[in-house]
Amino acid sequence: MRIDVYPTIQDLEKEKLSGADCVVIDVLRMTSTAVNALYSGARRIKLAGDERVARELSLSENALLGGERGGVRLPGFAFGNSPLEYTREKVKGRDIVMTTTNGARAAEAAIGAKSVRLCSFINVRAVAESLKASDHIIILCAGTHDKFSLDDCLCAGALCAYLNADEANDLAVGMRLLFEAYKDDIPLVLRQTKHYRYLESIGFTDDLAFSLRINTHSCVPMMDEDGWFS
Ligand code: MLT
């Protein structure tokens, strides 16, 4: 097995996607939110980087709309990007269209891979178990505004630790070592990072605690041929 970790959408080597299983990571917060929404009983989730496309899709698909800009819920949306909003009462049996600043664009960029999964700390071991037979895994970190974001890459390191591949790129090696050194106190590391501090400053402390717990969920969202995750 080979693993390549890419820190941002711009770093992705698109031509390698078709032969690989791709894992998209946006710990704060899109992939944590999508995993929890499906765990709470949502039927399917589609991700759109463009707000207008998301609004149109939600109408044509009779889907609930969720997402953010600047971390905050968009006008007229049923949900923001807070995993805790997507409760069973609100989402059970429903399709959801989400648009977020970085994570949704990363999910779109992964289209064309052999398979596409969503991963966060909350479901990382389950994602690893679903990939044991893969020959080549591309881990696409969403990053923040096309810049490296430690929350996503540290989660990539966790996935690498569970998978123990024969070959890996340098970012995969480095992030695995960092995860192994700090796996018992992930919040300690991430509390010092920019997006964590931003979300804290706008009041999302509970989302941070929720998203940085490890292996609380066992669902593995996978993209179907129409671009829906279930
Ligand atoms: C994103 O996709 O950029 C994020 O999930 C931002 C956020 O924390 O809401």
Image (cartoon, rainbow, N blue to C red):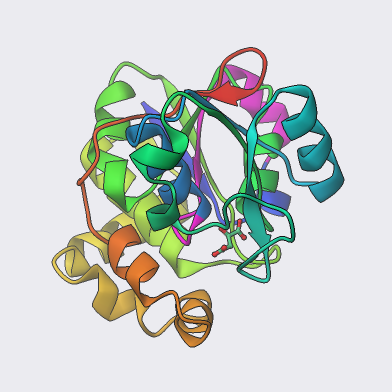
Using the rendered image of the protein, determine whether residue 166 is visible from the camera's viewpoint: no
Magenta residues, as a range? 13-29
**Residue in view at x 52 percent, y 51 percent:** 30
Q: Between residues 130 and 172, which one lies in front from this camera angle?
A: 130
From the viewer's perspective, is 96 left or right of 122?
A: right
Residue 193 lies in the magenta-colored region = no
Quadrant in the picture for residue 217: top left
Q: Between residues 98 and 192, which one lies in front from this camera angle?
A: 98
**Residue in view at x 63 percent, y 12 percent:** 225
- Residue 90 at x, y percent in the picture: 44, 41
- Residue 86 at x, y percent in the picture: 43, 47
Using the rendered image of the protein, determine whether residue 112 is visible from the camera's viewpoint: yes
* Rendered-image quarter of ligand 1: bottom right
Residue 22 lies in the magenta-colored region = yes
**Is 203 rendered above or below residue 108?**
below
Q: Between residues 116 and 158, which one lies in front from this camera angle?
A: 116
**Residue in view at x 70 percent, y 36 percent:** 108
- Residue 1 at x, y percent in the picture: 36, 26
